[in-house]
Image: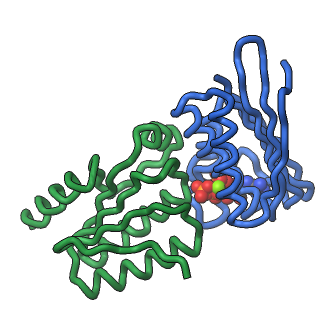
Chain colours: A green, B blue
């Protein structure tokens, strides 16, 4: 079965979304992530979408779901690497992702996560 | 206005949505749309193709390359023979969904393109036409 890989980076998990998302893949990812957060006691999840040429309401919902899931498992989500044209389009689409932090790239995202974990 | 090329694609499976996005990206590039306009068009295509599949029970995507004086454009028409949209005003309300969606597809798609035209009849189906100009 097709799956999106989840990489461990210290206290955090990195999900790089590279393929075209579809329903089953999104569902698998949510399950895998829940398992990994619980197994590794990760404090944060980075979702790298730099390879995505569009983000529609379907992917938006998936991101919101992952963020909600992480939150109840005591981990924070940061969305990284959004392409500028995608960002402009998202605003017009009306998709705001409440509670989802964003960062320009993976490094900045890690910084953000470390910072907020320290503050807790 | 002149139609310089046209074609059609099925929207019957999840994979067809992916293929429709890729095909429309290519058309948008060939048409000479700038990156942001391409991205907006492809995002609208993704929303409307998914609606065609999920609510319309599948249908077709027909595309046309247009030339109108100096400007060039792409028109994409989604049509299905599904249940139609009983209350259009409600469906065009941002955030309203009859399923488990975010209710962003229709209103969002309308904002993302230059022209948006929707015809629907209960029991007969739905036809949505979108156009993006250079
Ligand atoms: N082709 C169609 N045939 C029948 N009903 C439709 C069709 N397209 C949209 N609708 C109706 O219009 C509603 C609004 O559609 P819209 O795309 O805006 O939101 P959604 O699909 O519910 O959620 P989202 O697109 O944000 O995931 C749908 O919930 C559905 O009831
Ligand atoms: Mg929709």
Position of residue A76 relative to residue A73, above or below, is above
- Residue B57 horizontal side relative to residue A14, left or right: right
Position of residue B68 relative to residue B114, above or below, is above
| Quadrant where ligand 1 appears | bottom right
Q: Residue furthest bottom?
A: A39
Q: Quadrant of residue B11?
A: bottom right
In x, y percent, where is residue A12?
22, 71
Q: Nearer the viewer, residue B85 or A95?
A: A95
In the rendered image, which quarter contains the C terminus of chain A?
A: bottom left
Q: Quadrant of residue B81?
A: bottom right
Q: Nearer the viewer, residue B107 or A118?
A: A118
Position of residue A72 relative to residue B18, above or below, is below
Identify the residue shown where x is 50% and y is 39%: A89
Q: Residue furthest left?
A: A118
Q: Nearer the viewer, residue B86 or A81?
A: A81
In the rendered image, which quarter contains the N terminus of chain A?
A: bottom right
Position of residue B117 relative to residue B52, above or below, is above
Q: Residue furthest top?
A: B69
Q: Residue furthest right?
A: B124
Identify the residue shown where x is 29% and y is 80%: A37
Identify the residue shown where x is 63% and y is 27%: B32
Q: Quadrant of residue A68?
A: bottom left
In x, y percent, where is residue A56?
54, 52
Identify the residue shown where x is 20% and y is 51%: A108
In x, y percent, where is residue A57?
54, 54
Q: Is residue B126 visible?
A: no
- Residue B111 horizontal side relative to residue B17, left or right: left
What is the tally of numbered marks visible in this picture?
A: 0
Q: Is residue A81 visible?
A: yes
């Amino acid at each position: 079965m097709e799956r999106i890989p989840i990489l461990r980076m210290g206290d955090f998990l990195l999900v790089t979304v590279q393929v075209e998302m579809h329903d089953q893949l999104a569902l698998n990812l949510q399950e895998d992530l829940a398992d990994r957060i619980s197994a590794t006691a990760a404090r944060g999840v980075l979702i790298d979408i730099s390879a995505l040429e569009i983000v529609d309401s379907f992917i938006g919902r998936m991101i919101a779901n992952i963020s909600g899931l992480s939150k109840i498992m005591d981990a924070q989500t940061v969305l990284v690497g959004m392409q500028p044209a995608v960002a402009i389009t998202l605003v017009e689409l009306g998709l705001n992702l409440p509670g989802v932090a964003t960062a320009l790239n993976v490094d900045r995202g890690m910084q953000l996560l470390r910072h907020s974990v320290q503050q807790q | 206005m002149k139609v310089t090329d046209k074609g059609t694609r099925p929207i019957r499976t999840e994979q067809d949505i992916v293929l429709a996005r890729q095909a429309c990206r290519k058309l948008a590039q060939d048409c000479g749309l700038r990156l942001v306009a391409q991205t907006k068009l492809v995002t609208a295509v993704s929303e409307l193709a998914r609606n065609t599949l999920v609510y319309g029970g599948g249908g077709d995507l027909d595309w046309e390359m247009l030339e109108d004086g100096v400007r060039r454009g792409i028109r994409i028409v989604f049509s299905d023979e599904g249940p139609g949209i009983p209350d259009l005003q409600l469906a065009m309300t941002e955030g309203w969904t009859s399923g488990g969606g975010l209710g962003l597809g229709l209103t969002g798609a309308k904002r993302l393109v230059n022209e948006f035209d929707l015809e629907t009849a209960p029991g007969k189906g739905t036809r949505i036409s979108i156009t993006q100009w250079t």
